[in-house]
Amino acid sequence: MPSPVGHTLGAFAALVALEPRIVASRYKTTIALGASFVFGSLADADFVVAHFTSLPYLRHHYFSHSIPFAICFTVLFWILVKCFRLRNAGRLAGLIGVAYSTHLLLDYFADDGSRPYGIPLLWPFINKHFIAPFDLFYSIHRGEFSDIFSMHNLVGVMIEIAVLAPIALLMILRAQHQLNTER
């Protein structure tokens, strides 16, 4: 599974692709980067849930790494936004749902060092894990301090940046071009 760096870059690229006005101001870009970090990495919050339970479907890379959960999360976010009576609740919830879903996409293309290999994209309807036929990203080691700041993880983050930063940059340039054309 990629690091929070990769998940943030992936979510940010998707948000800019869908909502080019994000790059119209430094304030909007900062908010979008923060949202990308939070919602692009949120599926890994299942680490906390897994720590407090021994139920197999609450382990890491399980319930929060499925498309049905991403849809439920998006609907719950839409309800929350509607409660605050914010404008464009559907659009905002959709963007947050896409940011969340990029996590699933990146994890699908990542090396998985533990069983069951892959992610349960269709859980709870189908209890099967899916993984890409090739690895695009390293599985980032977590745990001890020495694991987190290892050479393996540094190389993994560098690969994520090499793959995802150009995509994010292309989306930014496309968005700026689109905004300049509208003026």
Image (cartoon, grey):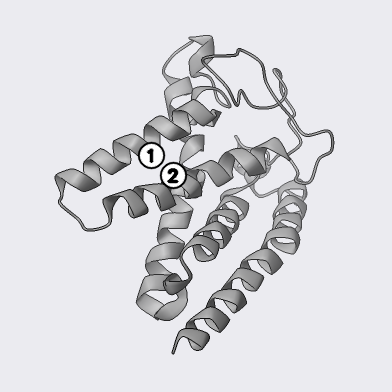
Would residue 35 be visible to someone looking at this image? yes
Q: Is residue 42 left or right of residue 150?
A: left
Please give left or right for residue 172 compared with residue 163 in the image. Answer: left
Task: Residue lying at the far right in this picture: please name it.
Answer: 134
In this image, 178 relative to 31: left or right? right
Disc 1 crowd, CA 10 A, few/some/many (<14, 14-19, 20+): many
Task: Determine whether 50 is above or below 13 in the image.
Answer: above
Question: Callout 2 environment at 10 Å: few (<14), some (14 to 19), or many (20+)?
Answer: many
Circle 1 sits in a helix, a strand or a loop, which is it? helix
Q: CA distance from mark 1 to mark 2?
A: 5 Å
Query: Quadrant where the C terminus lies?
Result: bottom left
- For the point 35% across and 48% down, the residue is 93
Mark sitting earlier along the chain (1/2): 1
In depth, the one of 4 and 122 nearer the eye is 122
- Three-letter code, disc 1: Thr
What numbered label is drawn on residue 74?
Answer: 1
Name the one closer to the observer, 170 or 139: 170
Look at the numbered disc 2 and give the secondary structure of its residue: helix
Kindly identify which numbered label has been placed on residue 147: none
Residue 112 position in % (x across, y down)? 73, 31
**Numbered circle sitting on residue 97:** 2
